[in-house]
Image (spheres, helix red, strand yellow):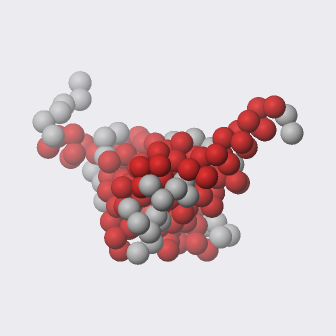
């Protein structure tokens, strides 16, 4: 293992431990930190646990937003996987994060929708199901409408 990957692994382990804290603030900090390592297999389980945090949906929202702000397949896959098994409360907060991240720029939303279409054919049924749900939520967002109603104009 090279030095860089060893350090990345160590950081994921430390953030995973922080994510198991009894204090919701620690977990809420661990989620965005771990989101930066979403492509690493070691981060997958802890990130899923934080997205589906049983004690505080603030942890859910912070983690989801950080994963979605990556705007890549790794972040979307974790959110989709969690969405497939989320209860209605967590689904609502995941939806809020989706709207917060993808309601401004249509290009970002469209790229995410394209990735979700690809992920909907994933061999992992949970990812495929969640990707279809995520795609539906993204399709409901009208970025121009949000900007227009917020009084913002594009020049």
Q: Where is residue 40 in the image (x, y as percent from the top left)?
A: 69, 49
The outermost residue toward the front is 22
Which quarter of the figure has residue 78? bottom right
| Quadrant of the image containing the C terminus | top left
Q: How many labels does the image show?
A: 0
Name the residue at the right extreme.
1
User: Which residue occupies 66% across, 41% down?
Assistant: 11
Position of residue 30 relative to residue 53, above or below, is: above
Answer above or below: position of 140 versus 88: above
Can the viewer see residue 134? yes
Q: Where is residue 7 in the image (x, y as percent from the top left)?
A: 74, 36
Residue 31 rendering spot, x and y as whole percentages = 50, 49
**Quarter of the figure that contains the N terminus:** top right
Is 52 on the left or on the right of 47, as rendered?
left
Is residue 150 found left or right of 19 in the rendered image?
left
Percent coordinates x, y for residue 16 in the rendering: 61, 52
36 or 17, nearer to the observer = 17
Q: Residue furthest top?
A: 155
Q: Residue at x 21, y 46 (%)?
A: 145
Q: Is residue 4 left or right of residue 109?
A: right
Q: Residue at x 41, y 75 (%)?
A: 87
Residue 114 appearing in the image: no
| Residue drawn 21% across the image and 40% down it | 147
In the displayed structure, does residue 1 sit left or right of residue 106?
Answer: right
Q: Quadrant of residue 46?
A: bottom right
């Amino acid at each position: 293992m090279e030095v860089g990957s060893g350090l990345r692994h160590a950081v994921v382990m430390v953030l995973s431990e922080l994510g198991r804290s009894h204090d919701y603030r620690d977990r809420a900090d661990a989620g965005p930190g771990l989101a930066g390592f979403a492509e690493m297999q070691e981060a997958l389980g802890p990130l899923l646990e934080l997205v589906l945090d049983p004690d505080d949906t603030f942890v859910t929202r912070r983690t989801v937003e950080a994963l979605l702000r990556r705007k890549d397949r790794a972040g979307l896959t974790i959110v989709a996987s969690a969405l497939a098994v989320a209860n209605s409360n967590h689904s609502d907060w995941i939806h809020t994060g989706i709207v917060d991240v993808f309601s401004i720029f249509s290009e970002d939303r469209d790229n995410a929708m394209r990735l979700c279409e690809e992920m909907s054919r994933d061999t992992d049924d949970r990812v495929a199901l969640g990707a279809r749900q995520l795609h539906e939520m993204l399709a409901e967002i009208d970025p121009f409408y949000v900007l227009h109603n917020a009084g913002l104009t594009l020049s």
